[in-house]
Image (tube, rainbow, N blue to C red):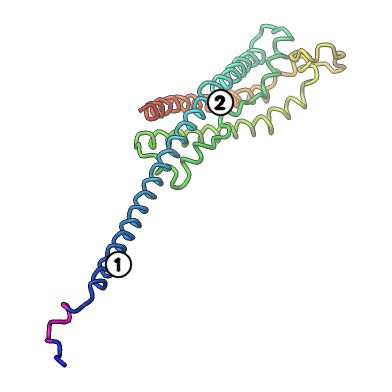
Amino acid sequence: MTEPLLGDEEETRPPQVERSTRNLLLEGLVIIASILLAFAIDAGWDELREREQVERLLMQLAEELELFIDNLGPASKRVTDRVNADVSRLLDCVHASEVVARDEWLEALGWLHRTYQFSSATPVIDLLTADGGLQLISDSAIREELSSVSSFLGIVKRFEELQGQFVTNEMIPWLNRNLDRYAIWKSIDPDWTDRVESRFESDLAALRTREFSNLLVERDRLLYLVVLFRTQTLERMKNLREMVRERTED
């Protein structure tokens, strides 16, 4: 029997073996390509979802800013303007020689303890300024202005807290000790009009003390700081809202 010559092995290899090897290679390449394509599609979807998430957050941020600019800001201004005017009126009652009508100074006293919490809940701002939150926003100008708004909100909140503590711990206790708050509320609240007259007397002399004058001066000082930083915060909020609007409209 004739022995096969060296080099004849490839010639004698069955054709189906070569086809099988090529098919395996092609299948492997197809699998690899499919995996790479799946990764690319998945990454693309992740990027799209992230962009959509950022767009939703920016729209929610604009709505949150509008709440402050169009509602909380004007409401807080109405209260603080009224309290500021009443503090001035009461200081005149204490130090001026003219006699002020009883209804006027009672009404002024009724507003004296009122405060308005401008820095209410800010879930979207808190989310975006938390650890890593700012990195969701690619626009550096929006990031910087958002960070500024968050900082000023923190300052306003601190002064509002100081104002609230002063009113609770010093102003209201003085009113309770020296004046009839029932008569005050009967004077200013329409729902109290039909109630019986107070059995206690409150006259202007009760206001004309050094202690009350000092309380009014401190109330005025804290109110000034709250209004100052609240106004600056609103200006930055307006700038940020314009930036966000331009970004979402592109």
| Contact check, label 2 and label 1, Cβ < 8 Å | no
Residue type at the position of mark 1: Leu
Q: Seen in the image, is 57 located left or right of residue 72?
A: left
x, y (%) of residue 110? 71, 18
Q: Residues within 10 Å of mark 1 (few under 14, many from 20)?
A: few
Seen as rendered, the residue at the extreme front is: 1
Q: Seen in the image, is 149 located left or right of residue 207?
A: left
Q: Is residue 71 magenta?
A: no
Front tag of 2 and 1: 1
**In-front residue for pair 73/94:** 73
Q: Which residue is mark 2?
A: 221
At x 74% / y 9%, what residue is drawn? 102
At x 37% / y 53%, what residue is drawn? 38
Seen as rendered, the residue at the extreme bottom is: 1
**In-front residue for pair 250/5:** 5
What SS does tag 2 mark?
A: helix
What SS does tag 1 mark?
A: helix
State the quadrant of the N terminus: bottom left
Residue 82 in the image: above or below residue 8? above
Q: Which residue is mark 1?
A: 24
x, y (%) of residue 24? 30, 67
Magenta region: which residues? 5-11
Residue type at the position of mark 2: Arg
x, y (%) of residue 22? 25, 67
Residue 168 in the image: above or below residue 77? below
State the quadrant of the C terminus: top left
